[in-house]
């Protein structure tokens, strides 16, 4: 059995810009957390490489800048957006 | 006394030699940095550009689970979701009208649930969206907060810039001199540089984010 070891975590942002360095094309947010395997201590040097670890990778891809069409927000939904 | 003078002279000659050999490398690095600028500055201007946009589309996906290897590839994801959002003005339209939320407003939002509109965090699907799909401008703002730690990702083969796919410079033909064609190829390469910034946030940020993921209930969803 393994469980997350929150004393050893890492968060990495990777931003890809366009060739003019003024527009974000993608943003990748990687959250890593070491895993304790079998109750033994975590090897800090290998925690995020050869050892199994928890990873969450969130990817945002941006497109259609200033070209989107209008959309209608239903009144009932609009009331909840306050 | 004379011996000391000779020794000092030899040392100086060696040091000058070392400096002379190190100069081109340093100059190349400086040129590359000048060309790209500071990562924090580039990120700031990109963040401003995104905030100023009247509308844009964002496709979001999240994968989570146990990973192995330095690439952090999740083999059997416990969590795997994807959503898209059309951002226009102050409102995000999620998955083509299934849910709405404010572009820059706390946790408020609305989601369709069995024909009724409910607060975003009142349903399990809404909680997943609210906790996992952070607003793009918020996520980018957080990256910007730690941008001083940012670094341009090194290009492959040390000094040879990586080209975007399908943009390799064509070899010159005909009357162009070798120097001219070399210059042209290098400028084309510079244009096609992949501009990737990597920022490692402090560990407490990672703990916060991890707690947020756990609070989404995505683990119990399977």
Image (cartoon, rainbow, N blue to C red):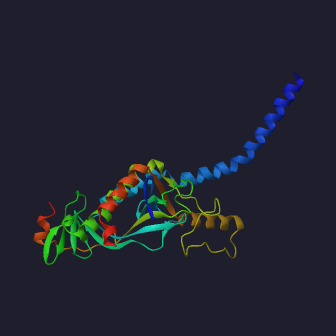
Residue B165 quadrant: bottom right
Query: Which is nearer the eye, A5 or B1?
Result: A5
Horizontal arrangement in the rendering, residue B177 relative to residue B188 (left or right): right
Q: Position of residue B150 (x, y in %)?
A: 48, 52
Above/below status of B205 relative to B172: above
Residue B190 seen from this side: yes
Horizontal arrangement in the rendering, residue B171 relative to residue A11 (left or right): right
Q: Position of residue A41 (x, y in %)?
A: 51, 54
Residue at left offset 74%, top offset 45%: B20
Above/below status of B161 relative to B17: below
Residue at left offset 52%, top offset 58%: A47
Q: Residue furthest top?
A: B1
Query: Which is nearer the eye, A20 or B2?
Result: B2
Above/below status of B33 relative to B81: above
Quarter of the picture holding the N terminus of chain A: bottom left
Q: Position of residue B175 (x, y in %)?
A: 70, 73
Residue A26 seen from this side: no
Count the marks: how many?
0
Quarter of the picture holding the C terminus of chain A: bottom left
Residue at left offset 34%, top offset 68%: B219
Above/below status of B51 relative to B74: above
Q: Residue furthest right?
A: B2
Q: Position of residue B27 (x, y in %)?
A: 64, 49
Residue B138 quadrant: bottom left
Residue B220 quadrant: bottom left
């Amino acid at each position: 059995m393994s469980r997350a070891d929150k004393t050893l975590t890492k968060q990495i942002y990777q931003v890809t810009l366009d060739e003019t360095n003024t527009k974000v094309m993608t943003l990748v947010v990687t959250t890593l957390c070491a895993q304790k395997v079998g109750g033994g201590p975590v090897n800090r040097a290998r925690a995020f490489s050869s050892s199994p670890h928890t990873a969450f990778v969130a990817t945002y891809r941006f497109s259609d800048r200033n070209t989107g069409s209008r959309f209608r927000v239903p009144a009932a939904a609009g009331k909840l957006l306050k | 006394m004379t011996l000391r003078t000779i020794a000092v002279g030899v040392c100086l000659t060696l040091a000058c030699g070392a400096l002379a050999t190190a100069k081109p490398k340093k100059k190349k690095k400086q040129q590359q940095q000048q060309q790209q600028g500071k990562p924090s500055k580039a990120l700031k201007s990109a963040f401003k550009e995104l905030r100023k946009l009247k509308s844009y589309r964002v496709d979001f996906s999240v994968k989570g689970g146990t990973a192995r290897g330095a690439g952090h590839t999740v083999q059997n994801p416990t969590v795997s979701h994807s959503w898209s959002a059309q951002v226009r003005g102050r409102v995000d339209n999620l998955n083509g009208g299934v849910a709405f939320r404010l572009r820059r407003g706390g946790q408020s939002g609305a989601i369709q649930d069995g024909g009724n509109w409910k607060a975003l965090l009142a349903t399990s699907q809404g909680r997943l969206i609210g906790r996992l799909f952070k607003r793009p401008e918020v996520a980018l703002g957080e990256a910007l907060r730690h941008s001083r730690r940012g670094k341009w990702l090194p290009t492959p083969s040390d000094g040879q810039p990586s080209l975007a796919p399908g943009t390799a410079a064509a070899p010159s033909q005909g009357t162009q001199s070798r120097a001219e064609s070399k210059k042209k190829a290098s400028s084309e390469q510079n244009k096609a540089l992949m501009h990737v910034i990597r920022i490692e946030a402090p560990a407490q940020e990672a703990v916060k984010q991890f707690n947020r993921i756990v609070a989404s209930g995505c683990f119990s969803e399977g």
